[in-house]
Amino acid sequence: MQAKSPKDSRTIVTDLVLPSETNPIGNMFGGELLARMDRAASIAARRHSRRIVVTASVNHVAFNKMIPLGSVVTVEAAVSRAFKTSMEVYMDVWIEDRESGIKSKANEAIYTFVAVNESGTPMEVPQLIPETDLEKARYEAALRRKQLSLVLAGKMKPHDATELKALFV
Ligand SMILES: CC(C)(COP(=O)(O)OP(=O)(O)OC[C@H]1O[C@@H](n2cnc3c(N)ncnc32)[C@H](O)[C@@H]1OP(=O)(O)O)[C@@H](O)C(=O)NCCC(=O)NCCS
């Protein structure tokens, strides 16, 4: 399988925040943003693997900034590292100032997807070769995040999380 770069999977989804998608103080409901990110990330994982993909884990979400009603929200997703059958997808969320059009970063998130066949069996995916400094930094840290996610899910013993342990000892 030929290796791919993050730009092969880059997915940009832009949409408005409507009244039914807000909380009682008029800002975007967190679950709505999670769903938009899940859709954008799944397209990125599909573009990388060219397979059916399922969300295995939501590894990290930082709701740093409130997103008011009427905002134009852009979710930018790309695969940041591919393992055997799983892919980490890193997302940046931007909001656009109405008058200037300048985009500012509102949130970040990291999801893990697994490529599967029609029976739901995990399938191998192409490897990823990062190009820019940011892509390389995200790639490098992805193994630690995978181990943390597996430990939290009870699928890996903390003792076996060697990359993660190396941060502390
Ligand atoms: C995700 C799923 C396919 C994994 O199946 P599994 O039987 O655990 O398969 P494996 O143990 O072989 O894991 C497959 C890959 O997923 C990774 N993985 C599984 N759980 C993970 C987690 N919580 N965090 C990060 N990676 C995870 C494994 O490390 C492995 O990666 P690798 O092959 O790249 O090394 C399976 O749990 C599933 O179908 N879950 C439901 C998915 C779904 O319906 N999502 C939508 C929810 S509404």
Image (spheres, rainbow, N blue to C red):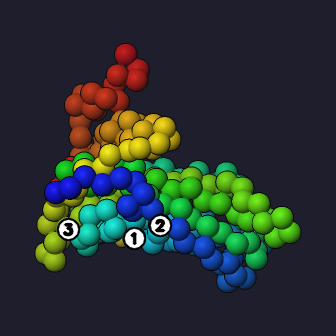
Indicate the amino acid at tag 1: Ile
| Position of 148 relative to 67 (above/below) | above
Q: Residues within 10 Å of mark 2 (few under 14, many from 20)?
A: many
**In the displayed structure image, the side of residue 155 where residue 58 appears, left or right:** right
**In the displayed structure image, the side of residue 6 where residue 75 appears, left or right:** right
Give the quadrant of residue 42: bottom left
Task: Kindly identify the residue that appears in the image at 60 percent across and 73 percent down.
Answer: 14
Q: Is residue 138 visible?
A: no
**Of the numbered discs in the image, which one, if any, rests on residue 43?**
1
Residue 36: image x %, image y %?
A: 53, 71
Q: Is residue 87 visible?
A: yes
Indicate the amino acid at tag 2: Thr
CA distance for labels 1 and 2: 7 Å
Q: Residues within 10 Å of mark 3 (few under 14, many from 20)?
A: some
Give yes or no for contact between labels 1 and 2 (Cβ–Cβ under 8 Å). Answer: yes
Q: Secondary structure at mark 3?
A: strand
Q: Is mark 1 within 8 Å of ligand 1?
A: no
**Of the numbered discs in the image, which one, if any, rests on residue 116?**
3
Q: In which quadrant of the rendered image does the C terminus lie?
A: top left
Q: Nearer the viewer, residue 92 or 159?
A: 92
| Position of 120 relative to 145 (above/below) | below
Report which residue position mark 2 lands on.
11
Q: Is mark 3 within 8 Å of ligand 1?
A: yes
Q: Name the mark nearer the viewer: 3 or 1.
A: 1
Indicate which disc, 1 or 2, sits on the residue closer to the N terminus: 2
Residue 11: image x %, image y %?
A: 47, 66
Ligand 1 lies in which image quarter? bottom left
Indicate which disc, 3 or 1, sits on the residue closer to the N terminus: 1
